[in-house]
Image: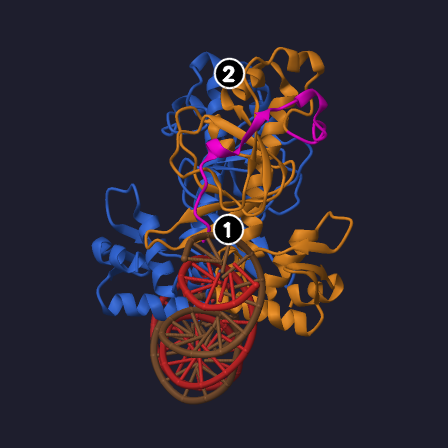
Chain colours: A orange, B blue, C brown, D red
Amino acid sequence: MVRGVTLRDAWSGEADCINCSLRTSVLFAGLTETDFAEIHDPIDQFNLKPGTSLYRTGDAADHMFTVRSGVMKLVQYLPDGSQRIVRIARTADVLGLEAMIEGGGYQHDAVALQPTEVCRFPARLVRDLGCSKPELQRELLSRWQRALSEADAWLTELSTGSARQRIARLLLRLVRDRESSACQLFSREDMGAMLGITTETASRTIAEFKRKSLLVETSPNRFLLDIPNLNRIAQE
Amino acid sequence: MVRGVTLRDAWSGEADCINCSLRTSVLFAGLTETDFAEIHDPIDQFNLKPGTSLYRTGDAADHMFTVRSGVMKLVQYLPDGSQRIVRIARTADVLGLEAMIEGGGYQHDAVALQPTEVCRFPARLVRDLGCSKPELQRELLSRWQRALSEADAWLTELSTGSARQRIARLLLRLVRDRESSACQLFSREDMGAMLGITTETASRTIAEFKRKSLLVETSPNRFLLDIPNLNRIAQE
DNA sequence: CGACACTTTGATTTAGCTCAAACATAGTGG
DNA sequence: CCACTATGTTTGAGCTAAATCAAAGTGTCG
């Protein structure tokens, strides 16, 4: 395990929302330039190295985050100390929705799995704007809904069936809605924590898939997927 | 499996919200009598027999529901036809939050596990009122948040660890925030679908718990729990 | 009473866990 | 530059919890 770097080290300046390439696909999609002009709160940008944690369970939740690039994992811990990854967030996903509820804390540890860029904005901003901008309100609800259906999918798809099926489904999930079938895999330990299996089983299964050419390793831990055959495995 | 009864048979009249015993604990907690007077949409009440489904996956989501008594399960199906129960809803819980998103469909099958009373109200009502009543807005967000953290808990608590642990955690969950340690169990099949184990394993584990007096059967399928010892099992 | 649905129990098999060792790969520092 | 550690991956061997398959038991309802 890489030890967590502090967030302070990761600061990379204030965000330039107006010219943001993601502007149409993120939470603030509905806002106009004038709306942005009215935002006086600082929107900061961070470059997270793998292993850096953005926030931890129980931290006072007063910011929300947009992932610009990279991947974050959301982790929960069991009483016995073992961890379970309950979701991942990728480009254009929002982290820390729970900050909408005033006075609450974050429900997970959010940790970068790859070099990851995020924008941070005060939840207050969304709470205040929300009242006047119904589009934002709607977008927010839809984000919440998406998080929920992701959570359900992790239960039904990634925590049900054999290890082979789970891994196949995880792989397919990583390239869904992507042009190419290329994907960067996670550490075996993380895959285990996502799927509720051991690192050894994850490793063995990946090895088996490689042998059967369901996965072709293009560079260390980057793969091309045989989507049709993985699909076959995924649904038994 | 009991075959689904149609909802039409379950209608039991219009609800009397003003005098509802749950008024302070449900979604509309913040509303005044005058607010209720302004509601002209019908709020209907239904008595569901076990096995009756309230709605199905993909049905046009235009109503939300409050559970007055009983238990409902939320079910999702896998491509191979097997089912997984992703959540349950009990007294004062809200079903069908996804109806807030206009034009969408329900994400689950909602099926009664016990004789269950629910109130049904148009989602439009909440959408409309939401704009003017910030308390309702806040309550709604908090409901959404609760659903999400329930979903996470099902993954971390009920789909992780040995069968004994999962069953112990499920049992404890059933009596949490209750005055007594008494609870009514579900069918072994449903328990299996909640925990990702087979009916046989569920049955064997319950039998084992009975032998060890962690469970005392007071009447058919009703039990008193030995909470401290179940807790010990739950956390390893 | 007989039929049906569900539960329990038993016997057997197996997928995945555990423990352990070998194998990368990348830093680190002399 | 190379030894040396550290961190993660792979592979093996054996064990065990849970799945599977099958049969007997229990309760409920027409």
Measured as percent of width and height from the top left, residue D9 is found at 55, 65
Visible in this render: residue A14?
yes
In the drawing, does residue A220 fall left or right of residue B75? right
Q: Which residues are magenta?
A: A1-26
Depth order, front residue of B110/A19: A19
Please give the chain letter of the residue carrying mark 1: B
Please give the chain letter of the residue carrying mark 2: B
In the drawing, does residue B21 fall left or right of residue C2? left
Q: Residue at x 66, y 67 (%)?
A: A233
Measured as percent of width and height from the top left, residue B213 is found at 21, 64
Reading the image, the residue beneath label 1 is B86
Reading the image, the residue beneath label 2 is B133
Q: Residue at x 42, y 19 (%)?
A: B30
Measured as percent of width and height from the top left, residue C18 is found at 37, 71
State whether residue A170 is above or below residue A36: below
* Figure quadrant of residue B69: top left
CA distance for labels 2 and 1: 31 Å
Q: Is B46 contained in the magenta span?
A: no
Measured as percent of width and height from the top left, residue A187 is found at 54, 57
Q: Secondary structure at mark 1?
A: strand
Visible in this render: residue B54?
no
| Neighbour tally class for label 1: few under 14, some 14-19, many 20 plus, Cα within 10 Å | many
**Amino acid type of disc 2?**
Lys
**Quarter of the C terminus of chain B within the rendering:** bottom left
**Amino acid type of disc 1?**
Val
Depth order, front residue of C19/B102: C19
Q: Secondary structure at mark 2?
A: loop
